[in-house]
Image (tube, rainbow, N blue to C red):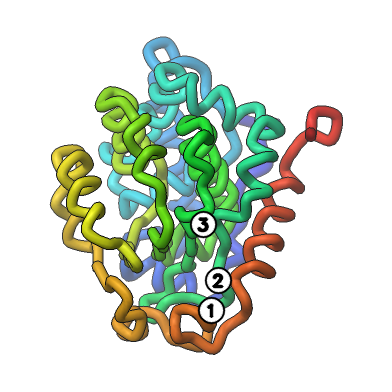
Amino acid sequence: MSCIKRYECTLSPELLEKAVKELNEPRDNEKRLQAIDELRNNYDAEKFGPLVREDDEFFLRFLRAKKFNQKKALTVLQNYHNVKKEFKEVFGKVNNPAVLTPIIEKEVMMMLPGVAKNGAAVMLSRHGLIDKDMDIYDFMAYGVFSMEKLLEDEAIQINGIATIKDLENFNMTFFTKISPLALGKMTKVWQEAMPMRYKESHVVNEGTFYDVIMAIVRPFLKKKLLDRIHLHGTNFKGIHEFIDPSILPPYLDGTGPDPDGLAKLWGETLMEDMPQDTAL
């Protein structure tokens, strides 16, 4: 412990207040550090393997995700390490992100400027850009790698994430390549192993095939997440109730930046994390 640089709170007064009120985060940093140490000391390395990180900031994201409930935070922390061992088809790629360069360059995902009305960061994904021949595990790893990057931001740890999934031109052939076993594993990653607060999910241009997708996915999803999915079809103005049009791209009836530029910027952000000697 003596060699670990301890966390020092640099949150803005507004963000700290939200963390205290909504996430039960201690206002006093010494109490915050005590909570971090308790989580660190309760982790069973013999059962779940060595910790991938031991810095205070790493443990803090799990505590925030579960509103400083030690038992729940520990479960997610252990699940996180478990899936890294058991789902190597995805996490082998996350650990070697250079192999994800081709899908990153497809510019499927991007972060919108600003935040949703509830304060959550907003990620837009254009699933129609996914090549039907793309490796499904590449796409899954791409999503995890993106979320890991977002979790570096304390504001996102506290405020959470909102997503917009654009399914225009989405090729069902790609989806049918997912085995029920892989789908179950991936759903477990998102719901039980990633220390992210998922606030809302908006789906546009879903078409009739969405019912087919949901028939397969629904059994794996918890009611809390299902209740946060909003279908908009081609009525993009319905999103405005949740996300101000000033940050939405023009094709979603917004006045924000062009999505291609945002996607390029997000790709560059992800590429910055890649080891220079292995990047493709």
Q: Give the x, y percent position of residue 57.
A: 56, 46
Q: Which residue is mark 1?
A: 249
Q: Is residue 200 above or below residue 255?
A: above
- Which mark is first along the chain, 3 or 1? 3
Look at the image and tell me whether residue 74 can be seen: no
Closest to the camera, between mark 3 and mark 2, is 2
Q: Which residue is mark 2?
A: 112
- Which mark is first along the chain, 2 or 1? 2
Q: Is residue 44 above or below residue 115?
A: above
Between the C-alphas of marks 1 and 2, the distance is 8 Å
Give 262 or 50, whichever is nearer the viewer: 262
Task: Determine the secondary structure under disc 2.
Answer: strand
Check if mark 1's residue and mark 2's residue have beta carbons within 8 Å: yes
Task: Determine the secondary structure under disc 1.
Answer: loop
Q: Which residue is mark 3?
A: 29
Residue 1's image quarter? top right
- Check disc 3 and give the amino acid type: Asn
Between the C-alphas of marks 3 and 2, the distance is 32 Å
- Check disc 1 and give the amino acid type: Pro
Look at the image and tell me whether residue 223 can be seen: yes
Residue drawn at (34%, 68%), measured in percent from left and top?
204
Left or right: 44, with 71 as reference point: right
Among all residues in the image, which is located at the extreme right? 277
Q: How many marks?
A: 3
Q: On the rendered image, what quadrant is the C terminus found in?
A: top right
